Amino acid sequence: MVREAMLYETLEEGKVRCDLCAHRCLIHPGKRGVCEVRENQDGRLVSLVYERLVACHVDPIEKKPLFHFYPGSTSLSVATVGCNFQCSFCQNYNLSQAPRLSSRIVGESVPPEDIVETALRSGSESISYTYTEPTIYFEYAYETARLASSKGIKNCFVSNGYMTEEALEAFHPYLDAINVDLKGFNDAAYKDVIKARLGPVTDSLRVLKRQGVWVEVTTLVIPGLNDSDEELARIAEFLAELDPAIPWHVSRFWPQHKMQDVPPTPLESLLRACSIGREAGLKYIYTGNVPGTGGESTLCSGCGKEIIVRRGFAVVKNKLADGSCPSCATPVEGVWK
């Protein structure tokens, strides 16, 4: 189903300017934006992925990862094809890069009403727009989130954070939580490996915090790319300045897509990132893709005791007492049931 896009400007000679993400693509008639799923059809920008679902699964909310937002609950995870990034290390490149690799738009015709009904039937307390980049299927996510919100279902983004402030303001009434991939703190690496820029991502994080959306951040630690002490410290210091209670997930890289020759992240690198994060003042730091090492549990920032015990994505014990540590009464920031 083709649907007219939100957030674009009509320009001279049939061209349009897309104002959805920070690329702000200038699109000529018959051409598509960087995401390959928004097309100028005779001076009218349309979404080619509206109601074109390619993934729909019930996941633990911890898989997003969101550890301080309704822990232990399930989230209906949905996606279309397409992405406005071209990450060399993308783990879902078969979906995110599909339109770029084949020019085809695939997906099952599923209206927003059916997604919300599926969430209700599954007992999911939220819908997560994930797997690819939700910004590029904005209209589909927007209509779904609007309906979900009216039914008491929360809405979560798992995003690269490259949306414009206009997009964030438009979605704000329905966005409850977001995990943003902060892929490093080096603009040159963003341009080289991702084909984007760092600045719009940090700008989005500032806007999201100002809006009151619950924010968590993930950094995939990649050997030789973003694993230096200096870069990890810059990420941690930025987050601590923004809000020391932002949970930071430092995740292990496994060879993917165009980076098959890069080795997996050593556990020591993740532990070093955790130490750097603590030194910067971050309260909650987690290790990802290394289950069984104890890095998934939530510790009290006051006394250091375990409050929410996890094994992988499973919550095995939740000791929260009205949002606080039961041992020392230190508040634990988050969105709790």
Image (cartoon, rainbow, N blue to C red):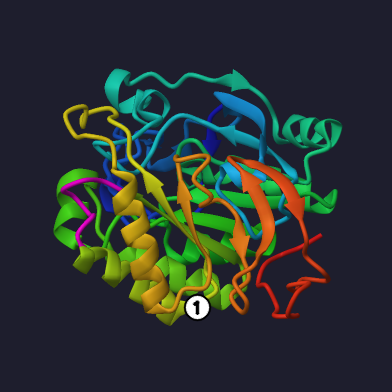
215 above or below 30? below
| Local secondary structure at mark 1 | loop
Q: Quadrant of the C terminus?
A: bottom right
Magenta stretch bounds: 221-228
129 above or below 7? above
Residue in front for this viewpoint, 253 or 184: 253
Residue position for label 1: 243
Q: Is residue 208 magenta?
A: no
Q: Is residue 276 left or right of residue 249?
A: left
Q: Which amino acid does the dot numbered 1 rest on? A: Asp
Position of residue 102 measured from the top left corner of the image (x, y, whole percent): 31, 18
Q: Residue at x 35, y 39 (%)?
A: 35
Position of residue 257 measured from the top left corner of the image (x, y, whole percent): 27, 27
Q: Is residue 223 magenta?
A: yes
Position of residue 336 measured from the top left corner of the image (x, y, whole percent): 76, 63
Q: Quadrant of the N terminus?
A: top right
